[in-house]
Image (cartoon, rainbow, N blue to C red):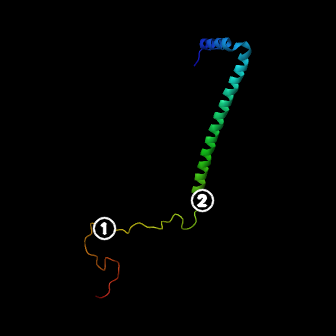
């Protein structure tokens, strides 16, 4: 931060360089430039916040939208499950769930 003595030196140098007639005009121009910069920064921040809010609202709306029947169903099921590795017994008719008849 600039202290009082540094500010005084800067003002004296500006007075010597630009003269008493141009100094108020220079200060006015500098004030307008700073105000424009602040306004542009505020607008940019507001746009970013608005975009974030829009994105969040769209995401929440998609989550709440009812899905038509069949949407989200896996139409390509994975590979069929293989038999358990630990069970090496041959499959008998009783084990397969078929009701056995005579030979």
Furthest residue toward front? 17
Furthest residue toward bottom? 102
Q: Is residue 67 left or right of residue 79?
A: right
Quarter of the rendering occupied by the N terminus: top right
* 11 versus 54 height, above or below: above
Q: Give SS at disc 1.
A: loop
Residue 65's disc number:
2
Quadrant position of residue 94? bottom left
Which residue is nearer to you in this view: 94 or 89?
89
x and y percent of residue 93 in the render?
A: 30, 80
Quadrant position of residue 35? top right
Which residue is nearer to you in this view: 51 or 11?
11
* 89 versus 38 height, above or below: below
Label 2 vs 1, first from the N-terminus: 2
x and y percent of residue 92 in the render?
A: 28, 78
Q: Would you name the residue on which mark 1 appears?
A: 84
Which residue is nearer to you in this view: 91 or 37?
37
Q: Give SS at disc 2.
A: loop
């Amino acid at each position: 931060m600039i202290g009082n003595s540094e500010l005084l030196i800067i003002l004296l140098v500006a007075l010597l360089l630009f003269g008493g007639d141009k100094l108020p005009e220079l200060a006015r121009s500098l004030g307008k430039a700073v105000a424009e910069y602040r306004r542009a920064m505020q607008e940019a921040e507001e746009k970013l916040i608005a975009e974030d809010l829009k994105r969040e609202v769209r995401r929440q709306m998609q989550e709440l939208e009812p899905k038509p029947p069949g949407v989200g169903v896996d139409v390509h099921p994975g590979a069929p499950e293989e038999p358990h590795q630990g069970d090496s017994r041959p499959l008998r008719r009783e084990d397969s769930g078929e009701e056995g008849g005579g030979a």
